[in-house]
């Protein structure tokens, strides 16, 4: 029996990056809104961001979420109006993506060890990935590839065949289509923590051969997991992933 070829999301599947993403978002926001200059987030801001993390699709949106929290918006109001807020405050998404990446680069340049500590892998995941050494597997993420590489290398994980990150400007569905074309005889198993991503794949008839799993340890909600099961998407726990 052929092993499935894993296409793994990164944040929320491999790496618990919520705290680092919040802090990077705040740091970047200080360059956008002058009244935030020389400020730092407090613990309540970080915890509120973690509650909002399932609503975030791409890292740069953390700039907007941290700005809203700094302005006193409630978690509930942000969740209810997140699309509107992102359109209003993130009109120049290209600029914000660049700023977010540059802010991370500066943090790494000045305090790399601190940055790595802020990006821990979920328990047991490093060992699981080390066992994939020699196999074909991929990371499919909206994170910039250089950051994924640094985190994996710091955890002694051999890099996958390819990291499909933000740099490639490919949506995840396009990546999956490419992987299917490359590995037609194998099952492509997408392991994700965002239900909207999986639902988009489910609706794409060209991707019907992709095996999908939603992780219950990532950035999603109980409602997301219930909805996934209703749609026939398998929900897995960390122990199951580590043993497969």
Image (cartoon, rainbow, N blue to C red):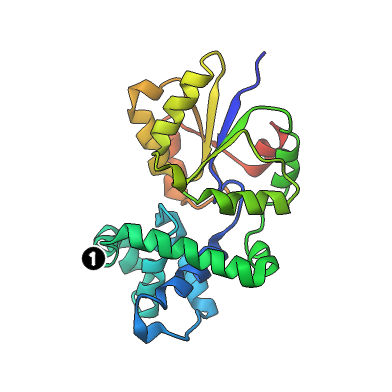
Q: Judge whether residue 227 can be spotted in this image.
A: no
90 above or below 14? below
Q: Residue at x 64, y 53 (%)?
A: 150
Query: Crowding near pointer 1: few (<14 within 10 Å), some, many (20+)?
Result: few
Please identify the quadrant where the N terminus is shown.
top right
Residue 117: x and y in percent read 68, 64
Q: Residue at x 40, y 40 (%)?
A: 197
Coordinates of residue 31 in the picture (x, y in percent)? 40, 76
Compared with 232, 15 (above or below) is below
* Front residue (pair 235, 91): 91
Residue drawn at (65%, 37%) of the image: 241
Residue marked by disc 1: 88
Q: Position of residue 17 (x, y in %)?
A: 57, 59
The quadrant the C terminus occupies is top right
User: Which of the pair 178/213 is nearer the observer?
Assistant: 178
Instruction: Confirm whether residue 154 shows in the render.
Output: yes
Q: State how many labels appear.
A: 1
Give whichever of 120, 94 is nearer the camera: 94
- Residue occupying image coordinates x 66% and y 66%: 112
Q: Secondary structure at mark 1?
A: helix
Q: Is residue 83 left or right of residue 30?
A: left
- Identify the image quadrant of residue 78: bottom left
Q: Is residue 166 left or right of residue 186?
A: left
Quarter occupied by residue 73: bottom left
């Amino acid at each position: 029996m052929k092993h499935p070829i894993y296409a793994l999301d990164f944040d929320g599947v491999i790496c618990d990056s919520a705290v680092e993403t919040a802090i990077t978002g705040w740091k970047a926001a200080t360059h956008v809104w002058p009244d935030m200059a020389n400020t730092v987030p407090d613990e309540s801001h970080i915890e509120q961001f973690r509650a909002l993390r399932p609503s975030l699709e791409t890292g740069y949106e953390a700039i907007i979420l941290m700005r809203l929290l700094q302005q006193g918006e409630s978690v509930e109001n942000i969740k209810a109006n997140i699309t509107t807020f992102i359109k209003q405050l993130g009109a120049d998404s290209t600029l914000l993506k660049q700023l977010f990446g540059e802010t991370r680069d500066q943090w790494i340049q000045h305090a790399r060890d601190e940055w790595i500590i802020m990006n821990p892998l979920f328990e047991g995941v490093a060992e699981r990935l080390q066992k994939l050494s020699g196999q074909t597997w991929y990371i499919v993420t909206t994170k910039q590839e250089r950051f994924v590489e640094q985190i994996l290398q710091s955890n002694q994980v051999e890099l996958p065949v390819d990291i499909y990150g933000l740099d490639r400007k490919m949506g995840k569905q396009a990546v999956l289509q490419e992987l299917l074309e490359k590995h037609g005889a194998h099952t492509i198993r997408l392991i994700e923590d965002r239900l909207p991503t999986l639902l988009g794949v489910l609706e794409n008839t060209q991707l019907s051969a992709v095996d999908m799993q939603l992780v219950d340890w990532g950035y999603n909600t109980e409602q997301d997991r219930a909805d996934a099961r209703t749609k026939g998407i398998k929900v897995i726990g960390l122990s199951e992933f580590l043993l497969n």
